[in-house]
């Protein structure tokens, strides 16, 4: 979820394309020589892309694919607007966008390989990563400023944290959606607006575009508290940095990214299905080293990475729901600036 710009489109996909690219990853890389390459489009972070490439290269597919990375909004817009006419043979993408694209365009094949997941997933994709949100604190700054340890997201709206909070903007980071899902789930839309407005007032200039922005500011001591990805805080605490994390009582919400194969009829590249299977069956060990949440039968999440309050939003996550929550966030930002 590195700097994911989520200026989400309406379901036609046209608006998503016009609203600009997200920065989940930058640029694209070609891995294949001339020939019938499998074209892979992805919104994944660099670490995930590297793990997937290693799985493919280590299992006989080196030189047989081209990996191209996009921002989440740009790739989501392409899926919605182009459907099966998209150039890619396979995609790895935010699962909620795959769901929306499949509903609109019926563009993905059911996967032909067996990969039993811990939670039910559609037949046309399997998850590659899962990331949860949490409160992140710099223990040294917290002590120096005489601030209490927060226990919930609502605490972050307390004026005592004025100018000591860093969060991300949901227009530019899917990490922010984890926070807003938790607030809406716990307090309803009206209650969420009240809390989120207070958080934005406290954050002031520390509302970041990048999903990793808050943890960077917390690490640097620019602020005492941030909201970010839980696994990043766990890793930094393990390295001996003055970083700790708090599972908010409103819940640890999560987002997954998944692999899917484009249904191009007679023009479907058969190797795409093979490579999707290879990524799932040979890439998970390396992927789980960075994204530790267990996704498949036989996997485990170590104790440090088991969140206290794992929750899922009551509605299916879709591009439309994200757009609704972006509008809610915009209202709160405007109110915070009054």
Image: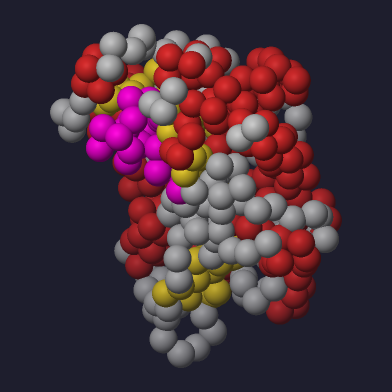
Name the residue at 54% across, 28% down: 201
Query: Does any portion of residue 67 appear in the rendered image?
Result: no
Residue 173 appears at what percent x and percent y? Answer: 54, 46
Residue 97 appears at what percent x and percent y? Answer: 68, 51
Name the residue at 33% across, 25% down: 224
Does residue 221 show up magenta in the picture? yes
Look at the image and tell me in which quarter the C terminus lies: top right
Q: In the figure, residue 336 lies in which quadrant?
A: top right
Q: Nearer the viewer, residue 334 or 18?
A: 334
Q: Nearer the viewer, residue 198 or 322?
A: 198
Vertical comparison of 171 with 231: above or below: below
Vertical comparison of 228 with 266: above or below: above
> Residue 163 vs residue 95: left or right?
left
Q: Nearer the viewer, residue 36 or 165?
A: 165
Q: Residue furthest left?
A: 240
Q: Report the span colored magenta.
A: 210-233
Residue 145 appears at what percent x and percent y? Answer: 28, 17
Name the residue at 74% across, 55% down: 9
Does residue 309 show up magenta in the picture? no
Query: Does any portion of residue 173 appear in the rendered image?
Result: yes
Vertical comparison of 108 with 180: above or below: below
Vertical comparison of 169 with 178: above or below: below
């Amino acid at each position: 979820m590195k700097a994911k710009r989520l200026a989400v489109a309406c379901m036609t996909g046209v608006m998503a394309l016009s609203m600009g690219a997200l920065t989940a990853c930058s640029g694209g890389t070609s891995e294949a020589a001339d020939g019938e390459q499998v074209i892979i489009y992805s919104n994944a972070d660099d670490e995930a892309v590297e793990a997937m490439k290693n799985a493919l290269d280590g299992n006989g597919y080196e030189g047989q694919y081209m990996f191209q990375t996009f921002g989440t909004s740009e790739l989501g817009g392409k899926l919605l607007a182009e459907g099966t006419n998209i150039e890619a043979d396979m995609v790895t993408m935010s699962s909620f966008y795959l769901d929306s694209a499949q509903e609109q365009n019926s563009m993905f094949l059911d996967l032909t390989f067996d990969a039993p997941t811990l939670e039910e997933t559609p037949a046309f994709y399997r998850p590659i990563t899962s990331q949860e949100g949490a409160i992140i604190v710099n223990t040294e700054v917290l002590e120096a400023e005489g601030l209490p340890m927060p226990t919930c997201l609502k605490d972050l709206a307390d004026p005592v944290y004025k100018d000591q909070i860093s969060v991300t903007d949901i227009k530019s980071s899917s990490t922010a959606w984890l926070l807003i899902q938790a607030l809406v789930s716990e307090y309803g839309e009206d209650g969420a607006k009240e809390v989120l407005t207070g958080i934005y007032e406290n954050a002031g200039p520390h509302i970041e575009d990048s999903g990793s922005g808050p943890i960077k500011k917390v690490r640097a001591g620019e602020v005492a508290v941030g909201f970010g990805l839980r696994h990043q805080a766990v890793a930094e605490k393990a390295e001996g940095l003055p970083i700790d994390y708090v599972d908010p009582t409103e819940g640890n919400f999560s987002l997954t990214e998944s692999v899917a194969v484009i249904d191009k009829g007679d023009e479907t590249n058969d190797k795409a299905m093979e490579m999707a299977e290879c990524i799932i069956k040979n890439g998970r060990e390396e992927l789980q080293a960075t994204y530790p949440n267990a996704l498949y039968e036989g996997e485990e999440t170590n104790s440090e990475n088991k969140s206290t309050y794992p929750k899922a939003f009551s509605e299916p996550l879709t591009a439309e729901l994200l757009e609704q929550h972006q509008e809610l966030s915009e209202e709160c930002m405007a109110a915070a600036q009054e």
